[in-house]
Amino acid sequence: MANHKKPVEAVGYMRTSSAANVGADKDSEKRQRAAIEGYAKANGYIVVEWFYDAAVKGADAVTSRPGFSAMLDRVASNGVRSIIIESPDRFARDLAVQLAGHDFLKGLGVQLIPATAPDFFLEDTPTAVLVRQVLGAIAQFEKSSLVAKLKAARDRKRAEVGKCGGRKSYAEARPEVVMLAKELSEQRMSYRQISAELATRGHLTAGGKPYVASAIQSMIKE
C-alpha cells in the first residue's frame, strides 16, 4: 500500500506596493499567488488561507500591516507554522525590515519561505549578519534610552513631590495616625509607649497588630 505523506499546512502572504497595481485586472496578485501555489505543490505544502496587503510599502514595518497582522492572529490560533511568499522583496524591500520581520516570526516559531529563494532567510551572509548586529545594537540603545528617560522622569517627580512610585508613606496612607504619633512624641513618650497608646485607641497595622518601634520612628520623621 502506498504511503501518502500528509501535506504541511501553510498560509500564503502577498503584498503590492502601489495602488495602481491592485485590482482584478492587474498582474501582481495573480503572479504572487501562482508562484506560492507552485512552490507549495512541489514541496509538500497546502495553502489553507491567503493574506494580502494591497498598496502597502515594502519599507513599512511588517507588524503595522493589516494583512500581516490578520495573518499573525490566524497563525496563532490554527497552529500553522509556515508562511510562503513569492520572494523576499514581496515580504519587504528593505533588507533590515526583511531580517527584522523574519526574526520576529522565527521568535514565534514560524518559518518564512520565499518561493523563488527558499533558503534566503537561512543563509547567514556577511551583510545579513551585519544588519542583525546593527538591529540588535539599535534595540539595545532604545531600551537603554527608555530606561534612562524613565529614571529621569522619576527623579524629576521625586524632586517635585519628594516621592515617586512604590509603597505609600504613612503620612499618605494613615495621616491621622501620623498626626497622633507626633503629638504623643511631643509628650516625651518612647516609641514603644506611642505604639501601645495608638493600639489602645484602635490604630493598628493592616495585620491587626501594634506598630513596631521603627514604624513609629518613620511616622514621626515624616
Image (tube, rainbow, N blue to C red):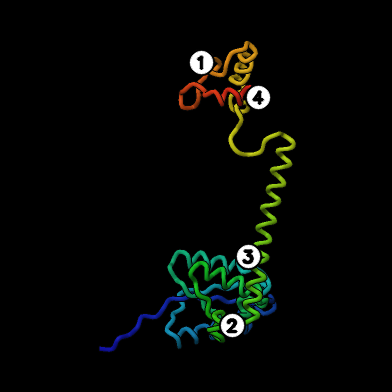
Give percent across and percent down for residue 222.
66, 26
Pinpoint residue 102: horizontal percent, then vertical percent. 57, 73
For numbered disc 3, what is the local secondary structure? helix
- Residue under label 1: 196
**Earlier residue among tags 2 and 3:** 3
Q: In the figure, is residue 201 to the left or right of 89?
A: left
**45 w.r.t. 180: above or below:** below
| Discs 2, 1 touching: Cβ within 8 Å | no
What is the total number of numbered labels drawn onto the structure image? 4
Q: Residue at 56% of width from left, 26% of height from top?
A: 214
Q: Amino acid at mark 2?
A: Ser
Mark 2 lies on residue: 87
Q: Residues within 10 Å of mark 4 (few under 14, many from 20)?
A: few
Q: Disc 4 or disc 3, which is closer to the eye? A: 4
Identify the disc placed on residue 221. Answer: 4
Q: CA distance from mark 4 to mark 3?
A: 52 Å
- Residue at point 52% right, 83% down? 36
Q: Is residue 185 above or below residue 136?
A: above
Residue type, numbered disc 3: Ser
Q: Quadrant of residue 156?
A: top right
Mark 3 or 1: the one toward you: 1
Closer mark to the observer between disc 2 and disc 1: 1
**Disc 2 from disc 3: Cα separation:** 20 Å
Residue toward you, 184 or 112:
184
The picture places residue 43, in percent across and down from the top left corner, at 45, 86
Mark 2 and mark 4 in contact (Cβ < 8 Å)? no
Q: Give the mark, 2 or 1, whose residue is nearer the N terminus.
A: 2
Give whichever of discs 4 and 2 has the lower sequence position.
2
Q: Quadrant of residue 144?
A: bottom right
